[in-house]
Amino acid sequence: MSVPVCAPSAIVSQPALQAQVLIVEDDQSLNELLSRQLRQRGYQVTTCFDGEQALCCTRQQTFNLILLDWMLPRRDGLSVLTALRAQHDTPVIMLTACGDEQERIRGLQCGADDYLTKPFNITELMLRIEALLRRSRGAVSAQLPAAMGYAGLSLQADGQQLCWQGQLQPLTPTEFSLLQQLMRCAGEVLSKPTLYQEVMGRPWSRYDRSLDMHISKLRRKLVQLGCQSCQIQTVHGQGYRLR
């Protein structure tokens, strides 16, 4: 069944560099629409229509970003995402027809960098793609020295890794950018609107929980490293800070 997508409301700028995008969507009309819109903006596009085909494509080719539908034949999107994260840190935007908060939380917990609920505006999708690509392809490395440190914790631009006492923990592009902002302003409270704009590349909405999920994932990774000298604190009604 075809899923309605809102028409573009504005012209989106061309990507600075060509990027390889994988579209995993079983609705043929939506798949074709997304593919056409991305190609018009200069992206290189590969399309898949089921989960098994998507995993096969990722084993054969490297992508800069993946658009991944939740409900797929042969293997659902959440299963595909879990398998991807075992091998890759490729940025993933999940597309879901369900607006249920728990479903979105599950996707973010499994490693999605962003999500969009159908029907969505094409312009908003393209802006989110551009924002995610900016974070993942050299923009972070260009702004950072080889490593940024705080209280013994090191954030390494090369490979987007977190280092604590010789142990390395890979980060997704969103997690890296988020921890980068917190380290730069260590001890200061950064508001949710500020973090959404600087890290997520979009305005804050009180119904959007994606930032909270990324914070939760970062906290778990700090615990996995055994790092106790740094904590991401929630300041009620204000935002987050690194202490």
Image: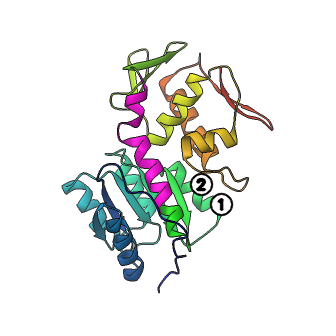
The residue where tag 2 is placed is 105
Image x and y of residue 87, in percent:
31, 45
Q: Tell whether label 2 touches label 1 (CB within 8 Å).
A: yes
Q: Residue furthest bottom?
A: 1
Image x and y of residue 177, in percent:
50, 35
Q: What residue type is labelled 1?
A: Glu
On the question of residue 132 being in view, the answer is: yes
The residue where tag 1 is placed is 101
Q: Is residue 57 left or right of residue 163?
A: left
Image x and y of residue 198, in percent:
57, 39
Q: Which amino acid does label 2 sit on?
A: Ile
Q: Residue furthest right?
A: 237
Q: What residue do we see at 42% from left, 78% from top?
A: 30
Residue 131 located within the stretch drawn in magenta = yes
Q: Which of 133 and 94 is in front in this view?
A: 133
Give the extent of the magenta segment. 126-144
Q: Is residue 207 left or right of residue 57?
A: right
Name the quadrant containing residue 217.
Answer: top right
Q: Name the quarter where the C terminus is drawn.
A: top right
Image x and y of residue 169, in percent:
41, 30
On the question of residue 111 being in view, the answer is: no
Q: What colouring does the structure picture have?
A: rainbow
Q: Is mark 1 on a helix, strand or loop?
A: helix
Q: Is residue 90 above or below residue 149?
A: below
Q: In this view, does 97 lie to the left or right of 40?
A: right
Q: Residue 216 carries which label?
A: none
Q: What element carries label 2?
A: helix
Q: In this view, does 32 lie above or below 112?
A: below
